[in-house]
Amino acid sequence: MATFTFVHLAHKEGLRLLDLMGVKNDLGRCLGMIDVMLPRGHDAPTMDALAVAILTVYGRVFMGGVRNEGKVPADQILTGEEFAIHRQFLETRSKHVAHSINAMETAKLRVWLNPEERGGRRINNVNADLAMLMALSNADYLHLRGFCAKFLTWVETEEAHEQARLKEIIGREFTLDQLYRMQADVTWTSGLDDTAKGRPR
C-alpha cells in the first residue's frame, strides 16, 4: 500500500494560508467550548473557565498581532445588527473578561453590624464582598456560535483559494526532485520555554 508523505516548506507566499489556519483553529475551539457550555449545569470553576476562554479565544481572531494576513472582515460577513453585537462581544472581552477590575466583577466593603439586642450598636468586622457575573446568557452564546459558523465558512473558502494558489506557485518554483529530498519538520511544543520562542514570519 502506498504511503503519502509531506514536507515542510518556508515560503513568504504561504503566510496568508498559515494565518487562516490559526483563525480556523480558534473559531473551531470557540464552537467546541460553546457546545460544552450551553447545557449549563457545570460546577463554578468549569463555568468560569469556559466563560473566560470562549470570549478570549473569540477575540484572538480579531485582535492585532502576528496573524495580520488572515483578517476576517466581520463587517462584510455579518449584518449591521449582528456586527453591533459582535463589537459588544469584543468590548466585553477586552474591557471586562481580560482585565482584573471590570463591570463583571464588583468588589465592595462589607461592614458587619452588631444586633442591637445583643450588646448594643457597634461594628463587629469589616471585610470584602465580591459579586461576579459568571457567564453570558444562552442567547448570547447562541449569537456567538452563529457568528463563529459564518466566519468559519468564509475562512474555509479563503483557505481553499490559498491552497490552490500555493500549489501552483510551489509547482513553478521547485522541481519534484527538490521537493522529494526535503524533510518534514515536526516540532512538538510544550512548556514555557517552547511557547516563548514564537513563530518565525
Image (cartoon, rainbow, N blue to C red):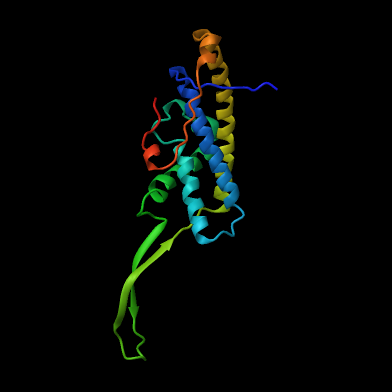
Which of the image's four quarters has the C terminus? Answer: top left
- Which quadrant of the rendered structure holds the N terminus? top right
For the point 53% across and 39% down, the residue is 82
Q: Residue 85 or 62: which is nearer the viewer?
A: 62
Residue 122 versus residue 17: which sits nearer the camera? 17
- Does residue 10 appear in this view? yes
Point out residue 156 in the picture as x, y percentages from the top left corner. Answer: 58, 28
Figure quadrant of residue 42? bottom right
Residue 69 located left or right of residue 30: left
Considering only vertical position in the picture, is 139 above or below 26? below
Please give the count of numbered marks on the rendered protein. Answer: 0
Residue located at (50% from left, 10% from top): 174
Q: Position of residue 200 (x, y in %)?
A: 39, 27
Residue 80 is at least partly visible in this image? no
Q: Position of residue 181 (x, y in %)?
A: 51, 15
Compare residues 88 and 44 and report the one nearer the observer.
Answer: 44
Residue at image point 53% right, 38% down = 27
